[in-house]
Amino acid sequence: MKNDEREHLEKQVKEGPKDVLEMIIREGARRMLQAAIENEVSEYIDRFKTQTDLQGHRLVVRNGSLPEREIITGIGPLPMKQPRIRDKRAGENFTSNILPRYMRRVPSIDALVPFLYLKGISTGDFSHALANILGENAPGLSATNIVRLKKIWEQDYQEWAKRDLSDKRYVYFWADGIYFNVRLEDPENNRQCILVIMGALEDGRKELVSVLDGYRESKQSWQEMLKDLKQRGLKEAPKLAAGDGGLGFWAALSEEFPETKEQRCWVHKTANILDKMPTSVQDRAKVHIHDMYMAPTKDEAMKAYNHFLSSYEVKYDRACECLRKDVASLFSFYDFPAEHWVHIRSTNPIESTFATVRLHTKRTKGCGSRLATLTMVFKLVLEAEKTWKKLKGHKLICKVIEGVKFVNGEMAKITEEAA
């Protein structure tokens, strides 16, 4: 497809009404969105209704509403009032997936179409879904236009997936396997997912490295992915890779990039440990886990680690074994700049990007094509990339690449040998 046709089509789909002031905001749409937000808050409060303090007061309660704000949409501004939640549990805060705290505009069509697809909405239902979100009079919402736009994006993905990587230098990798509501080709196969690798470049920018379908626990799936990166010119191994302990990624990484250090994701690890403990002790245990990865030095982190084991091993041996099995790769981040710790001790760059579309409920009956799903993940991440910030302390990346030794996040002092 020619560039001018591409630009015309994308402009037609993205373009809002010429005169927003002439549009009438339907009260029904506003009420539906408000009801969805209220329901989300009610479900959150109800989930923790049994958790109380020593006086018997609930730890999670509603606390009025935030000031009214306007959300800019394709049909004009929608006034919304968001309920406020008081969460007195240590280190916990409620964040709405429907209306994030600082959201002022609805996502662009470039992000909205992939979002709907990965939520399990079929192409034939896109027009109706987009009309409900952007208004009946928003142009470019026909099923034909959406299909044509998908084909353009598929071409973009195929070209991107073959791009040359010989000039790329990634210092960090983040890896994860993401499950979506849409099935992948085989409707009976619930284990297949989308494998994602993101990387940090020499200048501190984060970018999508690879997207492929496969199996989360499969060494072969991840090895094919890593081999492809090398075949397309990636010469240097990342200095560190972060991911969940259940991934087949680690077995593949040890063969393809054996020099790369491993860092288990503390977010995944925390969830896995707490899942093996009763609700009554989870809050306290979570504080002790927090003490490990937030310790200023590795020695103090290990003290917190040993304290956790001594405190819980007798009663909750499965939880302690979950922690113990990955101890060799849970504290690798201490060998890198302290400014980078917030980025590399978890897979948050991936988690935050897919938080609203990854599978939380039973998959839809519909079956998505392999190429279409890969394309939508690719497009969603490219839109998210526009808002990503550089790594904190990115000027220290050159030191990491040079192999400078870091101890507890600080450059090791070099002592000269006596002459």
Image: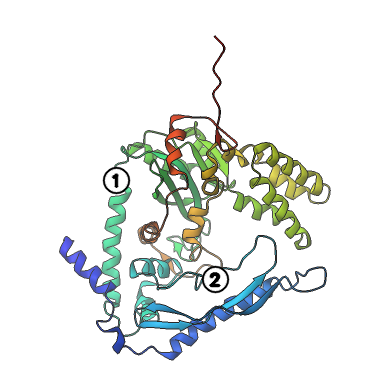
Q: Residues within 10 Å of mark 2 (few under 14, many from 20)?
A: some
Tell whether 303 sits left or right of 20: right
Using the rendered image of the protein, determine whether residue 44 is visible from the camera's viewpoint.
no
Instruction: Locate the C terminus by quadrant.
Output: top right
Residue 84 place in picture, x, y as percent: 60, 76
Q: Position of residue 124 (x, y in %)?
A: 35, 76
Quadrant containing the N terminus in the rendered view:
bottom left
* Percent coordinates x, y for residue 158 in the rendering: 30, 53
The residue identified by callout 1 is: 163
Where 8 falls versus 21 (above or below)?
Answer: above
Q: Amino acid at mark 2?
A: Ser
Look at the numbered disc 1 and give the secondary structure of its residue: loop
Marker disc for residue 96: 2
Tell me: 51 left or right of 339: right
Please report contact status of discs 2 and 1: CB closer than 8 Å, yes or no.
Answer: no
Seen at 27% across and 76% down, the residue is 140
The answer to which image quadrant residue 327 occupies is top right
Name the residue furthest front: 419
Residue drawn where x is 62% and y is 42% of the image: 330
Q: Is residue 11 left or right of residue 279?
A: left
Under circle 2, the secondary element is loop
